[in-house]
Amino acid sequence: MPIVLVISGPSGTGKSTLVKRLIARERNLEFAVSVTSRPPRRQEVAGRSYRFVSQERFRSMAEEGAFLEWAAVFGNLYGTPKAALEEAAARGCDILLDIDVQGAAQLMEKLPEAATVFVLPPSRRALEERLRTRSSEKEQEIERRLGEAAGEVGRFPAYQYVIVNDDVESTVEALRTILAAERSKRERMAGRIQPILMEFGIDPEEPE
Ligand code: ADP
Ligand code: 5GP
């Protein structure tokens, strides 16, 4: 089973920025491209940022059971295709999901072994500034996203890890450290350590 690394956090906290840098730096880690009914932003690349579909198409995909989880967020539909996980697993890669708190709650039920990270902004003010600097939404939409931020932040106790995205580089390093820790979990190391243990005359099945 690949590691499923889930990140959530309020809109504008820097998740997409972190995802891009993490994927660029980590071998064997793939981003699960979500499907959304939201229209693309100017700099977004279809198929790389999201798979953009109509509401109707999204709903029929949901009915067909194409999603591992899906949710309505800020008036649009977003979902993680099951195929993204299956394809990453087939390639021997771990997988990174950027999903909202509702989707993450569904995923925690289905995949309790997933590693979950909540990304906080350094302050509410910084969050507001980031949303405004990104200038990808109109004022009304920015207000809506800020209005929902408190409810989202309140869900942080459900996550295993919490990081504050103050300096981007340090935050990417914190995410890499989390990934490295997940990869070093004893049960994940079984295949790698087996021959070493055997050299010491230790039966990997019954080490005592
Ligand atoms: P999200 O995906 O969480 O909605 P984005 O990655 O789009 O957030 O980031 C929102 C804005 O904040 C972008 O303009 C991005 O360049 C900026 N940003 C991201 N991380 C930081 C950071 N650590 N410090 C300052 N600005 C940041
Ligand atoms: P944005 O419109 O800013 O790209 O994303 C809005 C919110 O949708 C963010 O909180 C983001 O994490 C979330 N999101 C993106 N993809 C998915 C997905 O596949 N499932 C769920 N549940 N949320 C998603």
Image (cartoon, rainbow, N blue to C red):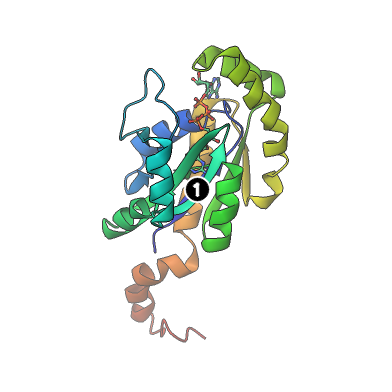
In percent of width and height, residue 150 lies at 72, 33
In percent of width and height, residue 176 lies at 47, 43
Residue occupying image coordinates x 58% and y 61%? 109
In percent of width and height, residue 10 lies at 61, 32
Residue 104 appears left or right of 19: right
Q: Amino acid at mark 1?
A: Trp
Is the residue indicated by label 1 positioned so its CB lies within 8 Å of ligand 2?
yes
Q: Secondary structure at mark 1?
A: strand
Front position in the image: 49 or 187 = 49
Q: Residues within 10 Å of mark 1 (few under 14, many from 20)?
A: many
Residue occupying image coordinates x 68% and y 31%? 148
Q: Is residue 96 visible?
A: no
Q: Which residue is mark 1?
A: 70
174 up-or-down from 194: above or below:
above
Front position in the image: 122 or 99 = 99
In percent of width and height, residue 165 lies at 59, 30
Residue 66 appears left or right of 206: left
Q: Quadrant of residue 108?
A: bottom right
68 up-or-down from 9: above or below:
below
